[in-house]
Image (spheres, rainbow, N blue to C red):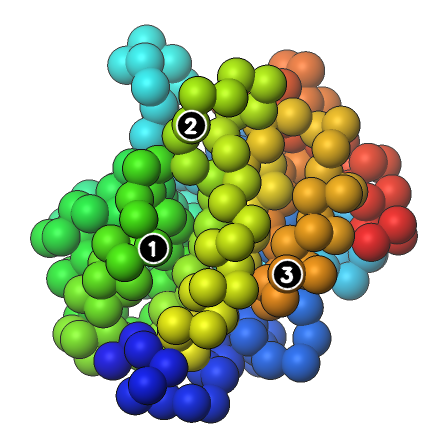
């Protein structure tokens, strides 16, 4: 179902009134984690001023260490909804448990399935029965075929609104957090009709190369970019090294 052979026309996923996969590139920005209402409000205020429409923020954080900040859970989703409504933004947020999908659809506009859960088939099935868009991230060591089969799990359950997101894969390279697989972009566009985004923050893990990476992603045919931003990255509760501050977000947008 996700194959180009089945559908030659690009799928445009509508997130409310925001098209993902159409003529216009889309920029998804927001903090790694929802930390407080004030933090989300600062980000949302700048984003709406700059013309962004989609805000991201994690309420359920899949952290490597169990001792690290795990997210605010449902309270985090409520914060996102309240603030997004205040500024006319749409919410993208990761859900990690199948049982939380239904609850989450009250608050979010797009369910994100993270890299670590790309092959959590029970989660994919429940996301497939939801009727809101799903942003599916590529697994840390997933082949493109596995990635598209994961998308197929969702679409085959009746939810055709799937956005693919390349977020880097694990290689031997240590100077980036992950290795952005730029060839994934044209290959996914060729093999599938689904929209493709590139997460420039998790793929690189560093803020000093975001502009060239974003340019490369768009040049390769991505339908948009995801980037992490925080009012004060140095004190962020997660991914402090890779988030950009709000001035840097504005500069990135302008230069892009
Ligand atoms: C995220 O986008 O918040 C995230 C955890 O990314 P990934 O699943 O790609 O690691
Ligand atoms: Mn993050």
Residue at image point 74% right, 52% down: 215
Q: Earlier in the sequence, mark 2 or mark 3?
A: 2
Q: Which residue is mark 1?
A: 144
The one of 120 and 180 positioned closer to us in this rendering? 180
Visible residue check, residue 26? no
Locate the C terminus and report the quarter of the image it occupies.
bottom right
Residue at image point 61% right, 42% down: 200
Q: Which residue is mark 2?
A: 171
Residue 107 spot, x, y in % from top left: 40, 58
Residue 76's tag is none
Residue 220's tag is 3
Q: Which residue sits furthest top?
A: 67
Visible residue check, residue 172? yes
Residue 35 vs residue 250: left or right? left
Residue 104 spot, x, y in % from top left: 31, 55
Q: CA distance from mark 1 to mark 2?
A: 15 Å
Is ligand 1 less than 8 Å from the beta carbon at label 3?
A: no
Q: CA distance from mark 3 to mark 1?
A: 16 Å
The one of 149 and 155 positioned closer to us in this rendering? 149
Position above or below: 173 against 51: above
Q: Report helix, strand or loop for mark 2.
A: loop
Q: Earlier in the sequence, mark 3 or mark 1?
A: 1
Locate the N terminus and report the quarter of the image it occupies.
bottom left
Where residue 54 sits, quadrant-wise, is bottom right
Q: Earlier in the sequence, mark 1 or mark 2?
A: 1
Residue 177 spot, x, y in % from top left: 52, 24
Residue 193 vs residue 121: left or right? right
């Amino acid at each position: 179902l996700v194959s180009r052979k089945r559908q030659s026309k690009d799928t445009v996923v509508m997130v409310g009134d925001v098209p993902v996969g159409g003529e216009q590139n889309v920029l998804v920005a927001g903090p790694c984690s929802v930390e407080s209402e004030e933090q989300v409000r600062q980000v949302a205020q700048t984003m709406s001023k700059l013309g962004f429409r989609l805000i991201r923020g994690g309420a359920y954080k899949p952290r490597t260490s169990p001792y690290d900040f795990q997210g605010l859970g449902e309270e985090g989703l409520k914060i996102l909804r309240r603030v997004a409504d205040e500024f006319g933004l749409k919410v993208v947020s990761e859900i990690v448990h199948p049982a939380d999908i239904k609850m989450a659809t009250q608050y979010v506009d797009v369910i994100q399935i993270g890299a670590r859960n790309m092959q959590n088939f029970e989660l994919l099935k429940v996301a497939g029965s939801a009727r809101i868009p799903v942003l599916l991230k590529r697994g840390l060591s997933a082949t493109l075929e596995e990635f598209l089969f994961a998308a197929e799990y969702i679409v085959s359950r009746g939810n055709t609104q799937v956005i693919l997101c390349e977020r880097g894969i694990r290689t031997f390279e240590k100077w980036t957090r992950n290795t952005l697989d730029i060839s994934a972009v044209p290959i996914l566009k060729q093999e599938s009709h689904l929209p493709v985004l590139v997460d420039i923050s998790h793929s690189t893990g560093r803020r000093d190369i975001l502009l060239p990476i974003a340019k490369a992603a768009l040049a390769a045919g991505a339908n948009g970019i995801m980037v992490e931003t925080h009012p004060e990255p140095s004190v962020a509760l997660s991914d402090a090294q890779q988030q950009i501050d709000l001035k840097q977000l504005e500069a990135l947008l302008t230069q892009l």
